Image (cartoon, rainbow, N blue to C red):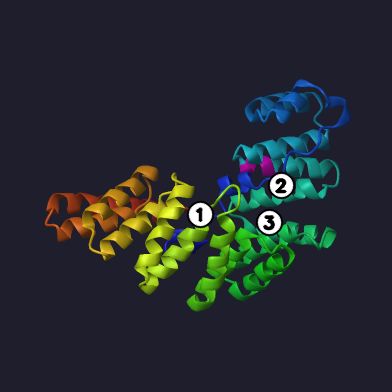
Amino acid sequence: MLYLGVVVALAPAICAAQAPAPPDLPAPYHGTPIDKALKAREWPRAEELLLAAIERQPDSPGLLSVLGSVFLIEKKPLNAAIAIKKAEALAPLDDRARFTLVLAYIALNHGDWARPELEKLIASDPSNPGYDYWLGRLDYDAGQYASAVKRFQKVIDAEPDSVRAYDNLGLCYEALNQPDDAEAPYRKAVELNRTAQPKSAWPPLNLGILLRNRGDLKEAEPLLREAAKYEDHLAQPWYQLGVLLEQVNRPDDAIAELKRATERDATYAEPYYALARIYRKQNRKAEADEALATFERLHDAKRATPSQ
């Protein structure tokens, strides 16, 4: 998802983080080294042992389903999808395996493949809010924002403490050009996020950007710092903080935060454009030219990358 320069991507890392635990091994494998590796969360070892077991028993849908889950946790969504589809060719999938397939397709940026699988899951378990949540995400990506709003509101009705549902609801309202309506769900997401484990950078980041764009810089700054504190490895909070500090005429502080953004994601183009702008104001022509050239190179590389 892309809105106001913030990426809320359906990325392998996100899908792996929300992947269901691997299903139970077939009974003959209980207590085996595979079982022990899974319980110890030793994913590379579990993958190795599962592949060896499947080579000996290629017609085991149970082993293939477990392998698919392990692949997804390891951020190998294509392998996960292949393993689950092989399992489906041998026997009907249970809901947990089908949901693993959904997340693998989403991680591959194939919402068109994920949607019919989610619809099968909803038919099987219509009370599961997780399925509506992901359909809402797919609706958002497809530009069906009004439909996504209904999905996320349904999730909130079922799970009033859902940080991600409130946060995505705010994104939908922004996409509908209703920023005033976005503020309340963003604030609720921030409130819930502060007591959640683990905490996400996105609720304070999204609210901080909304407030910064509206000119409420005093309230926006601590929210952006909060986002950076929760997930220091993300570049976006540091970039947004740098832009804000430039707005309040603190260019040296802005440069420091923008450099932090580039350190966290060397392929993120926008911080370099902001750096070029600040350097030019400071008459640092060589540094401005270098930053602008880097921005153009990264921007062109991103545009040239074919979508999956």
Please give left or right for residue 263 compared with residue 64 in the image.
left
Residue holding disc 3: 114
Residue holding disc 1: 307
**Discs 2/1, front:** 2
Q: Secondary structure at mark 2?
A: helix
Residue holding disc 2: 100
Q: Residue type at mark 1: give it.
A: Ser
Q: Residue type at mark 3: give it.
A: Ala
| C-alpha span from label 2 to label 3 | 10 Å
Residue at position x 84%, y 58% in the image: 124
The verdict on residue 227 being magenta is no
**Discs 2/3, front:** 2
What percent of the width, then of the height, locates residue 299? 35, 55
Mark 3 surroundings: few (<14), some (14-19) or many (≥20) residues within 10 A: many
Give the mark, 3 or 1, whose residue is nearer the N terminus: 3
Give the mark, 2 or 3, whose residue is nearer the N terminus: 2
The verdict on residue 78 being magenta is yes
Q: Secondary structure at mark 3?
A: helix
Quadrant of residue 280 within the rendered picture: bottom left
Q: Residue furthest top?
A: 33
What percent of the width, then of the height, locates residue 70? 68, 36
